[in-house]
Amino acid sequence: MNTHPTPLTPIYLDCDTGVGDALAIAYLLATPGIRLAGIGTVAGALNAAVAAANTLNLLATAGRDDIPVAVGGYDPVDGPRPGTPGHGRTGQGRNGIGDVLLPRSRRHPVDESATELLIRLAHEHPGRLEIIATGPLTNLAEALYLDPELPRLVRRVTVMGGAVFAPGNAGKFAEANVAANPEAAADVFAASWPVTLVPLDVALAHSFDETHRRALAAAEGLTQQALAQMLGTCFTYYEKHFSTRRMSPHDCLAAAFASGDLDPERMPTLRIGVDTTAGPRRGQTYFAKVDGPVSADVRNGQNPHEARVLLSLRRDAAPRLLERILALAPARTTTPARSTAAVPMPEPAYAAGLSESVAA
């Protein structure tokens, strides 16, 4: 009889911590069988340093000061862009997390960059580390450049990004995470590691509404209460602009699928291309069926430029996502999160980029 416990699956999360990423972090913290070995932040809808501050503060609400957080890429790998927009126009508040002021963590990001953290974890857990990317793919592309052995060391990469048949959410054609750095996305999809893509097609079919928000608000844990406030900001925005109080938990859906909690209905292996031109379709993802017999490598999503693409799930994912997040044990803290229209002043040095990330 084997008395040794099954080792936990190490997870590296790469994100630009806004409301959706916050839901994903809470989900992963509550999921048994995995260990969130590290989190790297990337410039996406807000500055990477502000995303790191959001991440550390959120982890503190759950009493999880054991997880290293590293600041990653500020700009696309092909050069700087003219500034990173704030979340104000997408309903996530000026600080990216619904203008909710979380209690400030006493921790700072680790000294290594997100790319260095990823590479170190891959070498510490060869063949076991799984990557979940819920933001632009800048850090992953840089890691591939710095360590060509990385694809051999990583077990699987799950990316929230792209759109197959659904319209884009960063213009007419492109999905936001890919559009933020198309060159990086192209490099990640071209690598020989197993990739699973969770595109807008499946993400937009599932949503959190007032029922889910109220359940989170009624929970004992500070993390759940903070998430409820974040969702409230989003819902108010969507109600004003789209006459609906609901939002798609894109990033949380990708985290849940990567954790094995959701059953796929349609998930073909497709060949992926990314438009990296300067034209109106920049950032658009292109997909094609794989011709000929499917080899073992293709079935595992290991061939360059190919990935398993999740197009639909067997059932509504929202109840499962909510159930898991509600199961997150509350930390021993009495300091409540607050929601305000004001932007918190950056206290730690690593949040020095806050002003540019919330510029109008």
Image (cartoon, rainbow, N blue to C red):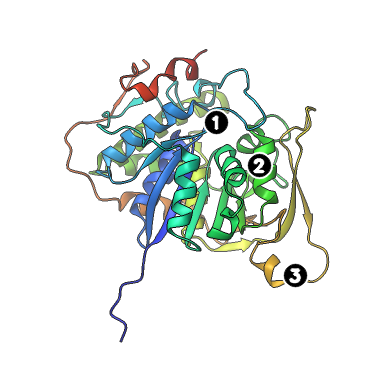
Can residue 168 be seen? no
Query: Is residue 302 left or right of 340 when viewed as pictured?
Result: right
Query: Quick one: label 1, few (<14), some, or many (20+) residues within 10 Å?
Result: many
Q: CA distance from mark 1 to mark 3?
A: 35 Å
Upstream in sequence: badge 3 or badge 2: 2
In the rendered image, which residue does mark 3 sit on? 294
Which residue is depicted at the point 35% across and 21% down?
Answer: 349
Element type where label 2 sits in the image: helix
Which residue is depicted at the point 24% across and 31% down?
Answer: 106
Element type where label 3 sits in the image: loop
Q: 218 or 356, which lies in front? A: 356
| Dot 1 amino acid type | Gly
Q: Position of residue 277 (x, y in %)?
A: 79, 32
Query: Quick one: label 3, few (<14), some, or many (20+) residues within 10 Å?
Result: few
* Residue 313 image-quadrant placement: bottom right
Disc assigned to residue 112: none
Q: Position of residue 355 (x, y in %)?
A: 44, 15
The image shows residue 205, relative to residue 90, as above or below, that is below
Q: Residue furthest bottom?
A: 1
Query: Is residue 163 left or right of 338 when viewed as pictured?
Result: right
In the rendered image, which residue does mark 2 sit on? 185
Quadrant, the N terminus: bottom left
Disc assigned to residue 44: 1
| Dot 2 amino acid type | Ala
Element type where label 1 sits in the image: loop
Can residue 177 be seen? yes
